[in-house]
């Protein structure tokens, strides 16, 4: 624990951004842009995979590949303060790279579980639409409903509790850090749980608008990075909630009018 106290002590620690992690984020964005420009991104959209002829296991696997790339592009930037602090703190370990790998592996695993659950839920939604003609004619309710859910969640105590944990990387390490790959894995899992708890509703919007939609990816990334890393980020949470509810109102009103 002594190394954490040194990092989080009275003397401010120099911020560190591991270059390999930044490079991975850049690669993820390049792949997303290239896929969008080249047209291949549409093949990995969740709706295309759900409605395609691929076996469910194969479709789920491809969806998780796209999902993990999106997590690297969108979520890792908001976790860079903790990742950098963990890298600095772990230098005194016997195997710092193994510890970092375990930490990131635990974090990615939590998001993979959420991505798999979201994909399977989407499969169930598509099955419901296919079985219920009324819902098929009013499918705009699904997208509008997701936006309503995301907007309401911005005002919940769970959002703020998870956000406060994500916004305090030094306190988080002081409470939970220990040496070794096992503790690093558990730390990554724990951080992943808080990160999902903070941002699951915003990431669920990606399922409504389509994985690899660049405009939404950029907008939501900016929102989550601001919420989790900037001094005024916590105060911006309800503003985002109001914006999402306003957008939901437009989607639902237009859908009702067009129907």
Image (tube, rainbow, N blue to C red):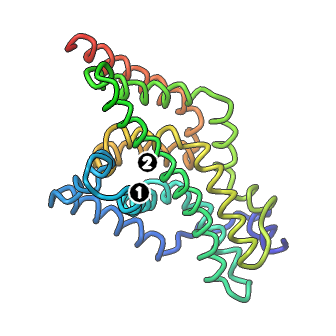
Question: Does residue 171 lie above or below 247 as drawn?
Answer: below
Per the image, label 2 sits on a secondary structure element best described as helix
Dot 2 crowding, Cα within 10 Å, few <14, some 14–19, many 20+: many
Query: Where residue 85 sits: x, y (%)?
Result: 65, 67
Alpha-carbon distance for marks 2 and 1?
10 Å
Query: Where residue 224 sits: x, y (%)?
Result: 49, 45
At 41% from the left edge and 38% from the top edge, which residue is drawn? 205
Q: In which quarter of the image is residue 26?
A: bottom left
At 79% from the left edge and 63% from the top edge, which residue is drawn? 9
Question: Does residue 243 lie above or below 188 as drawn?
Answer: above
Query: Where residue 105 sits: x, y (%)?
Result: 58, 69
Question: Does residue 238 lie above or below 175 as drawn?
Answer: above
Seen from this angle, which residue lies furthest bottom? 94
Q: Is 98 or 55 nearer to us in this picture?
A: 55
Judge whether residue 140 can be spotted in this image.
Answer: no
Q: Which residue position is annotated with label 1?
A: 67
Question: Does residue 71 lie above or below 26 as drawn?
Answer: above
Q: Quadrant of residue 177?
A: bottom right
Where is the C terminus found, in terms of image quarters? Answer: top left
Where is the N terminus found, in terms of image quarters? Answer: bottom right
């Amino acid at each position: 624990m002594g190394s954490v106290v040194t990092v989080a002590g009275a003397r401010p620690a120099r911020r560190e951004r591991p270059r390999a992690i930044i490079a991975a984020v850049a690669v993820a964005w390049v792949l997303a842009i290239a896929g969008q420009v080249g047209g291949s991104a549409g093949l990995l959209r969740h709706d295309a995979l759900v409605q395609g002829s691929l076996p469910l296991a194969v479709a789920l696997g491809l969806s998780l590949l796209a999902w993990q790339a999106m997590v690297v592009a969108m979520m890792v930037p908001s976790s860079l303060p903790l990742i950098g602090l963990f890298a600095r703190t772990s230098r005194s370990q016997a195997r710092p790279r193994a510890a970092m790998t375990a930490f990131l592996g635990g974090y990615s695993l939590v998001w993979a579980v959420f991505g798999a659950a979201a994909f399977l839920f989407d499969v169930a939604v598509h099955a419901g639409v296919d079985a219920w003609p009324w819902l098929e004619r009013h499918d705009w309710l699904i997208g509008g409903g997701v936006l309503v859910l995301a907007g309401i969640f911005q005002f919940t105590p769970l959002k703020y509790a998870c956000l406060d944990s994500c916004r305090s990387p030094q306190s988080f390490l002081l409470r939970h850090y220990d040496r070794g790959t096992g503790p690093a894995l558990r730390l990554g899992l724990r951080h992943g749980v808080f990160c999902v708890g903070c941002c699951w509703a915003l990431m669920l919007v990606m399922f409504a608008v389509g994985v690899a939609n660049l405009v939404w990816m950029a907008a939501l990334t900016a929102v989550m990075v601001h919420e989790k890393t900037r001094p005024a980020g916590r105060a911006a949470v309800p503003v985002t909630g109001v914006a999402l509810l306003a957008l939901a109102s437009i989607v639902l009103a237009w859908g009702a009018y067009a129907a």
